[in-house]
Image (tube, grey):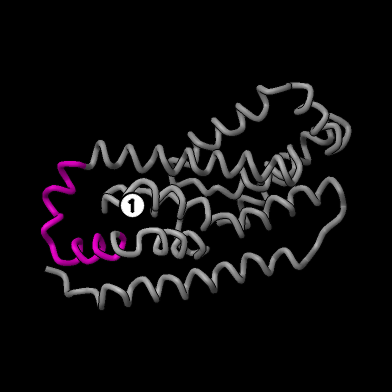
Amino acid sequence: MAALVAVLVAAVVAVCALRWGGVAGVRAEVAAAGAWAPLLFVALQALVTITPLPRTMFTVAAGVLFGAAWGLVLTITGTALAALAAYGLVRWVGGPLVARHEHRRVFAWVRARLDRSGLLAMVSLRLLPMVPFSVLNYAAGVARVRLVPFLLGTVLGVLPGTIAVVVLGDAVTSGDFNPALFAVSFAGAALGLAGATIAARRVGPAPDPD
């Protein structure tokens, strides 16, 4: 899915580049928009990625449109806002649902894991590429993960992979591609798997469903 989204983003950028005289022309148009361009980008990413749509399209576009440094800042900001909005929405709407199921043993185990290893668990799960961004936002809201570990763990966990993808997007315009950046994503996934295992062991094995 992420690869398909990346291809779609590349196609959109290519169309815009043809219209505005290359990718450099696209960046020039973005720069001419002033502060509205980054504000609109962050707001759009925050709104769209509350849903199950993947972040990849915005991560790639950030590097292409704003360069590596600003692109990273903007897409991480949009990611944090989307996570916070989804978390708050689930906490607000899902209160009655949580109240009906929080006595169950499995639910209690999840809560215990996230309470005792909140930051570690969030960083670990965010590092794993196979864990959908939006699904984890919803789960954290339902499980009533504390806000600070949730938000900090989100930013730290998505950072390695986001850096790699944003710099890749920037490389589309600069032509300076460094294959070593992909090692950041693989290392992050391995670190996430190890962290998730440690976090799970600290609260013991999961109980049988009720």
Q: At which x and y percent is residue 127?
A: 51, 63
Q: Which residues are magenta?
A: 95-114
Q: Quadrant of residue 69?
A: top right
* Circle 1: residue type: Ala
Look at the magenta stretch and give its main secondary structure: helix
Name above or below for residue 99 compared with residue 109. Answer: above
Q: Residues within 10 Å of mark 1 (few under 14, many from 20)?
A: many
Magenta highlight on residue 99:
yes
Residue denoted by label 1 = 140
Residue at 45% from the left image edge and 71% from the top image edge: 195
Give the total of numbered labels.
1
Residue at 48% from the left image edge and 38% from the top image edge: 81
Q: At which x and y percent is residue 20?
A: 84, 29
Q: At which x and y percent is residue 74?
A: 62, 39
User: On the rendered image, what quadrant is the C terminus found in?
Assistant: bottom left
Residue at 54% from the left image edge and 39% from the top image edge: 78
Left or right: residue 80 versus residue 28 is left
Q: Secondary structure at mark 1?
A: helix
Left or right: residue 154 versus residue 8 is left
